Every structure is written in C-alpha cells, then in structure tokens.
Amino acid sequence: MAILKILQYPDDRLHKKAVPVTRVTDKTRLLINDMTETMYAAPGIGLAATQVDVHEQVIVIDVSENRDQLLVLINPEIIASSGFSDYEEGCLSVPGIYGKVNRAESVTVRALNTQNESFVLEADGLLAVCIQHEMDHLAGKVFVEYWSRLKQTRTLAKLKKKQRSTM
Ligand code: QAP
Ligand code: CO
C-alpha cells in the first residue's frame, strides 16, 4: 500500500471529469487500497480518485466513529434524492477551509463494489452529504465552487497566504 499525494486547490486537474471504470480489476483494487490508506492517514472521511490525480469513477468513504466502516463506490449514480441539508463541509484538497453547501438530505445510490457487483445504498445525514461531495469531485467540481464569487475570492486569498507561510 502507499500514501498518495492529494491535489491541492486550486489545481486544474481537480476540474477533470472522471470516466467510468470499465471492469473492476486488481489494478482498480490496488488504487482503492492506496486511496483508503491515504484517506485514513490524512485523516479524512472521504476521498475521490480525482483528488489523487486518477480520473476514474472511484470513491472511498468512512464516516464511522471507529473508522471501521469503509464504503467503496465505483461508478456511483444517484437514482433518487430527497430533502435539503446544509452541512458544514471540508475537503482534503482544500485544507483549513470549511463552509456550508446546500445538498439533498437523503440519497439512493447505485454503484459497483470491489467485486464488480452492483448494489444499491440508501444514505442520509453525513454519509449522504459525503457521497454527494465526493461525486462532485468525479464531475470536476470542488465544494467551494458552490459559494458566491466574493467568498471564493476570499478563500483563494486565504489559501495563497497559507501557502506563502508554509514555504
Ligand atoms: C468531504 O472531507 C466531506 O480542512 C470529506 O485540515 C467533509 O475528509 C463531506 C480534512 C465534510 C461532508 C462533510 C479537511 C482534514 C478532511 C481539512 C474530508 C483538514 C484536514 C476533509
Ligand atoms: Co473533497
């Protein structure tokens, strides 16, 4: 296993659109193992392949308290959604920046597991928010891009300042 480098916002590669995995193979499972290790080490609750510069539709998530309920979503599709929520979100690609995004409260997702089998999952609460956040990454969208122009400009300034101070 290996810890992968996580792309840091702003980076054009975070805007690439991920392609579906044609067949889940050992190569896919290797990527998933590395992404899982990277997410737990960060530590984070979700990571999309886009964030490690692999533009395939693969997501790992673990929102559990004990960090022992890994969820892998390959080629995820939201087939139903309802309600509204506005959780305070963060992102491993945008460290130190947190803010609310309007999302669905519950989602039903269809995806493939690591054995190339299709399954359906109903999620709500933090898990539902996390699934939507990570699926946005696969579509090339970062959560701060939902914010107003003003708030995005301030966010970029803050990130730039932080970059300078850690050089
Ligand atoms: C996405 O984000 C998420 O700023 C996953 O300094 C987050 O794992 C979806 C992290 C919240 C819904 C709600 C962020 C770690 C981790 C930071 C993460 C940081 C260190 C973010
Ligand atoms: Co993120």
Image (tube, grey):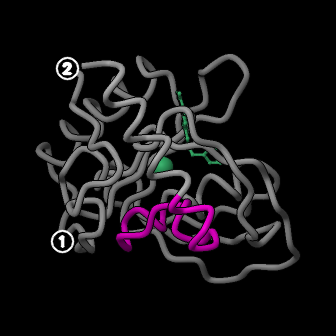
Q: Nearer the viewer, residue 23 or 35?
A: 35
Place residue 45 in its image quadrant.
top right
- Is 84 one of the magenta-colored residues? no
Residue at the outermost bottom position: 79
Determine if the C-beta at disc 1 is less than 8 A from ligand 2: no
Q: Nearer the viewer, residue 97 or 130?
A: 97
Residue 71 drawn above or below residue 76? above
The residue shown at (73%, 63%) is 122
Amino acid type, label 1: Thr
Mark pair 2, 1: CA separation: 23 Å
Q: Secondary structure at mark 2?
A: loop
In which quadrant of the rendered image does the C terminus lie?
A: top left
Indicate the position of residue 99 as horizontal and vertical percent values.
Answer: 70, 50
Q: Main SS type for the magenta part?
A: helix
Q: Secondary structure at mark 1?
A: loop
Report the side of 89 relative to 23 (left or right).
right
Indicate the position of residue 41 as horizontal and vertical percent values.
Answer: 41, 17
| Residue that badge 2 annotates | 1
**Which of the marked residues, 2 or 1, is nearer the chain's N terminus?**
2
Residue 30 drawn above or below residue 99? above
Amino acid type, label 2: Met
Residue 107 drawn above or below residue 89? below
- Within 10 Å of the Cα at label 2, are there few (<14), some (14-19), or many (20+) other Cα atoms? few
The residue shown at (38%, 51%) is 48
The dot on residue 61 is none
Label 2 close to label 1 by CB (< 8 Å): no
Indicate the position of residue 68 as horizontal and vertical percent values.
Answer: 59, 22
The residue shown at (24%, 22%) is 3
| Residue that badge 1 annotates | 22
The residue shown at (58%, 77%) is 78
- Residue range in magenta is 135-153
